[in-house]
Amino acid sequence: MGFDRDVATGRKPMLEGKIAIITGGGNGIGRTAVGMFIEAGAQVVTCDIDTEALASVKETYGDAVTIIGADMGTVEGVRSVVELTEETHGRVDVLYNNAGVGNLNKNYARVHETPYDVFERTLKLNLWSVFAMSRETLPLMLKTGGSIVNVSSINAQVAIPGSVSYIGAKGGVLSMTRSFAFDYAKDGIRANVLIPGYIDTRMVRDYTDKAPDPDAAAKEIADAHLLGRLGDPQEIAAAALWLASDASAFVTGSLLTVDGGYLAK
Ligand SMILES: NC(=O)c1ccc[n+]([C@@H]2O[C@H](COP(=O)([O-])OP(=O)(O)OC[C@H]3O[C@@H](n4cnc5c(N)ncnc54)[C@H](O)[C@@H]3O)[C@@H](O)[C@H]2O)c1
């Protein structure tokens, strides 16, 4: 995949003619990314376990999007998305592994208090799912080259209390991405990882709602960013779009931190 000067200068839509898979496109950042990728010229295939949300994505974007209810925590689920993409488009240029879950504990739990099943499920849905979706997509992507965008978290770099499963999974996504970059560089496939700060989605609201004083918890999180606020889903989707496009043709195995200055403190 070479450098496309027209994409880099904005003379050409960033994803013109590209086929992109976005996992977890029903809500939050994934849903925003579906809209932005389509606006940038891509045809998008998106999956989610929330089929109601997917139906509304289809209603909004029509023929530019193909939807499929699929669980990224199962081999059948990931295969069904890749098979549909191959049947519909015959190729894939971009894989944005966005789907993920937050802390699955009802309350925060230290390591010795974390149930085995919570740890396994969190790793399955945040780390194994990225491996499996990439494993199944790569044979198709090898035909054309492409770009894989994974999603880690600031919590892979600085810990928060009682979230060993999420932190472990997102740390794994970060290092696994470098392995993808290494293994496929000669095939014209790049792989990079986003490090978002706290973004204003259901995932963060679930987090603050568990706190004794949700408003105080929300303010505390906002204040932890140098910019004094949460990020907007568009601010992550825009970074994913850049990594997906040929404008970032010389970027692979990299971390792109989009955190309002959280990690700079
Ligand atoms: N919101 C944040 O502050 C934040 C920060 C760092 C990283 N992230 C990461 O960004 C990504 C998107 O998060 P979000 O905030 O938009 O969350 P969200 O909960 O708003 O959206 C996630 C979407 O993924 C779907 N999903 C979950 N499990 C799935 C599965 N097994 N199969 C298919 N779809 C599934 C959900 O139904 C939902 O539509 C996640 O990987 C998350 O860990 C979010």
Image (spheres, helix red, strand yellow):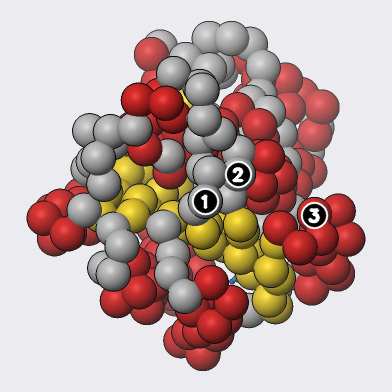
Mark 3 CB lies closer than 8 A to ligand 1? no
Residue 96, given in percent of the width and then of the height, sits at 48, 54
Mark 2 CB lies closer than 8 A to ligand 1? no
Q: Which residue is mark 3?
A: 61
Measured along the vertical axis of the image, is residue 74 above or below residue 140? below
Mark sitting earlier along the chain (1/2): 1
Please name the residue shown 70% across and 61% down the image.
Answer: 65
Viewer-proximal residue among 177 and 61: 61
Please name the residue shown 59% across and 9% down the image.
Answer: 227
Q: Which mark is residue 17?
A: 1
Q: Look at label 3 and name its amino acid.
A: Tyr
| Horizontal side, residue 149 vs residue 217: left or right | left
Q: Which residue is mark 2?
A: 41
The Cα atoms of the two marked residues, 1 and 2, are separated by 6 Å
Measured along the vertical axis of the image, is residue 91 above or below residue 236? below
How many other residues sit within 10 Å of disc 3, few (<14), some (14-19) or many (≥20)? some
Q: Is residue 73 visible?
A: no
Q: Look at label 2 and name its amino acid.
A: Gly
Quadrant of the rendered structure where residue 68 is? bottom right
Q: Look at label 1 and name its amino acid.
A: Gly
The reply to whether the C-beta atoms of the residues labelled 1 and 2 are less than 8 Å apart is: yes
The reply to whether the C-beta atoms of the residues labelled 3 and 1 are less than 8 Å apart is: no
| Horizontal side, residue 229 vs residue 12: left or right | right
Count all numbered tags in the image, as a single digit: 3
Mark sitting earlier along the chain (3/1): 1
Q: Quadrant of ligand 1?
A: bottom right
Residue 232, given in percent of the width and then of the height, sits at 68, 28
Residue 84, given in percent of the width and then of the height, sits at 57, 81
